[in-house]
Amino acid sequence: MRQTFRQNKAVALITAAILGTLILPSAPAKAEMDAERGKTLFAERGCVICHSVNNVGSDVATSLDASNMNIAREPFEFFARMWRGAPQMLALQQADLGYQIDFSGQDISDIFAFVQSREIQEGFTEQDLPDHIKEIIDNGPSTAID
């Protein structure tokens, strides 16, 4: 049975990959995670309206203190948990902020770095919160979804 060019190419690619001799075009660099930027985003975008860190924020949703997080420290599990709560999070964002928070992949990576960093979290205080976010927390964030 004669192999096609496509089959030969596939075999060659697999063999080269196994042998470590495959040279692929360079992939784009992975985004670096920035916990300091994540801290700023956590406060400014309003994550803190529902979640607390370092006793700052609300207890409407799970505390995201690095010291007591019992979820996997693997980013995909963290994001999967966020995704499972997305309908409730979106409804609460609309109720409390009047709009849906928009995050880029870099934003979420940086927030993940923040929730994993005890050192950066220890410096998180109410002074990091914008006034409009403090006001929402002080008035009591939404807890029920209609």
Image (cartoon, rainbow, N blue to C red):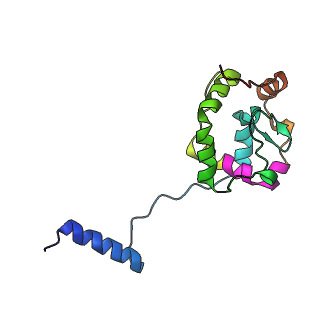
Residue 89: give x, y in percent of width and height. 65, 32
Is 116 a magenta residue?
yes
One can see residue 94 in this view: yes
Q: Nearer the viewer, residue 29 or 112?
A: 112
Image location (x, y in percent) of residue 107:
62, 44
> Residue at image x 78%, y 31%?
130
In this rendering, does residue 120 appear at all?
A: no
Residue found at the very far left of the displayed protein: 1
Q: What residue is at 64 percent from the left and 56 percent from the top?
A: 74
Left or right relative to 117: residue 87: left
**Would you identify the image quadrant in which residue 97 lies?**
top right
The tally of labels here is 0
Q: Is residue 87 above or below residue 118?
A: above
Q: Residue at x 71, y 23 (%)?
A: 144
Give residue 73's position: percent from left, percent from top. Answer: 68, 56
Give the percent coordinates (x, y) of residue 80: 59, 46
Against 8, is 70 above or below? above
Write the residue at 86% across / 41% down.
55
Q: Which residues are magenta?
A: 111-122
> Which residue sits furthest top?
146
Q: Quadrant of residue 49?
A: top right
What main secondary structure does the magenta stretch of the protein show? helix
Q: Is residue 28 left or right of residue 77?
A: left
Which of 35/81 is in front? 81
47 lies above or below 72: above
Image quadrant where one finds the C terminus: top right
Nearer-the-camera pick, 78 or 130: 78
Q: Is residue 81 magenta?
A: no
- Which of the image's four quarters has the N terminus? bottom left
